[in-house]
Image (cartoon, grey):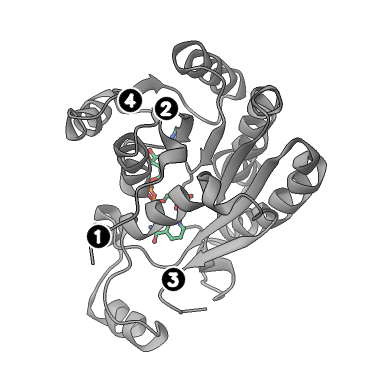
Amino acid sequence: MTNFARYPSLDGKSVFVSGGTTGIGVYFVTAFARQGAKVTFIGRNREAAAEVIAEVSDVAHRPLFIECDITDVAALQGAIAQGRAAHGPITVLVNNAANDKRHTTQGMTVAEWDAAIAVNLRHQFFAAQAVIEDMKSAGGGSIINLSSTSWKIKSPEYPAYATCKAAINGLTRSLAREFGMHRIRVNTLTPGWVMTDKQLRMWVDAAGLAERDHNQCLPGDLTSMDCANLALFLAADDSRMCTAQEFVVDGGWT
Ligand SMILES: NC(=O)c1ccc[n+]([C@@H]2O[C@H](COP(=O)([O-])OP(=O)(O)OC[C@H]3O[C@@H](n4cnc5c(N)ncnc54)[C@H](O)[C@@H]3O)[C@@H](O)[C@H]2O)c1
């Protein structure tokens, strides 16, 4: 089960990951670092970032952490510039950060709606915009946009998050068409219900697990590593002709 692939094409690659201090993002950072990539990651928690870096103390290139709130687009652009300065032109972008905050439709204000769009969707576009020239000059690149199956399975409780996660498919396909001629590939990575610490702490209960067992074709937990393994493939030369697609890792739920 843990005999995973090694991708020589990821060796030395400059990779940028948003939201790398908790959850699935930690596995994006550590999995790319273990493949020999030069990883820049952003988040808001320095202590958590130090733990992530310590986890991969044996890798060739120590990941670089930059404190950054992704809703501040200028700061995000600045963090990408710092990543470029440290590790060279960014040729892999993992747009991971999000917040699946619960809310009601009737109780939502315009400001709360705009904040949800900023944390779940807007930064994906502006991060892509900021790395396009790097990828063009490098002769190609891979942008991986994190979506979610939540909008497909009609999960209630977070219509703003679900709207963003659906919209990401449109963003992916549009950018893939515009920049495909430069060998820039853009794909959506769509996880199902991943058993992160946050999910276990906040939402996983016996009823939820029973629902999961009923809906997944495959038994057992979907893990952050399952998502990271798909991201590695989408970033590597092995997926060189895959673009404008949605890749779902959900144990067969949808
Ligand atoms: N866990 C799941 O079951 C699941 C399912 C489907 C999709 N996803 C998607 O996978 C991705 C990772 O999810 P996760 O479960 O690891 O969630 P998470 O909440 O643990 O992680 C999201 C990351 O984004 C960061 N983040 C949030 N707001 C930020 C901000 N304003 N500035 C900077 N960073 C910010 C968080 O700090 C965190 O590191 C998300 O795009 C999520 O929508 C997760």
Q: CA distance from mark 2 to mark 4?
A: 12 Å
Which mark is first along the chain, 2 or 1? Answer: 1
Which mark is first along the chain, 1 or 4? Answer: 1
| Residue 32 showing in the rendered view | yes
Residue under label 4: 63
> For residue 3, which numbered disc appears in the image?
1
> Dot 2: what SS?
loop
Looking at the image, which residue sits at the far bottom?
A: 214
Q: CA distance from mark 3 to mark 1?
A: 20 Å
> Dot 3: what SS?
loop
- Within 10 Å of the Cα at label 1, are there few (<14), some (14-19), or many (20+) other Cα atoms? few
Asked if the residue at label 2 sits under 8 Å from ligand 1, the reply is: no
Q: Up-down: is 152 above or below 230?
A: below
Q: The N terminus is located in which quarter?
A: bottom left
The nearer-to-camera label among 4 and 3 is 4
Which mark is first along the chain, 3 or 2? Answer: 2
Please name the amino acid that badge 2 sits on. Gly
| Residue 100 showing in the rendered view | no
Which mark is first along the chain, 1 or 3? Answer: 1
Which mark is first along the chain, 4 or 2? Answer: 2
Q: CA distance from mark 2 to mark 3?
A: 30 Å
Q: Is the Cβ of the residue at disc 3 closer than 8 Å to that at disc 1? A: no
Please name the amino acid that badge 4 sits on. Pro
Residue under label 2: 12
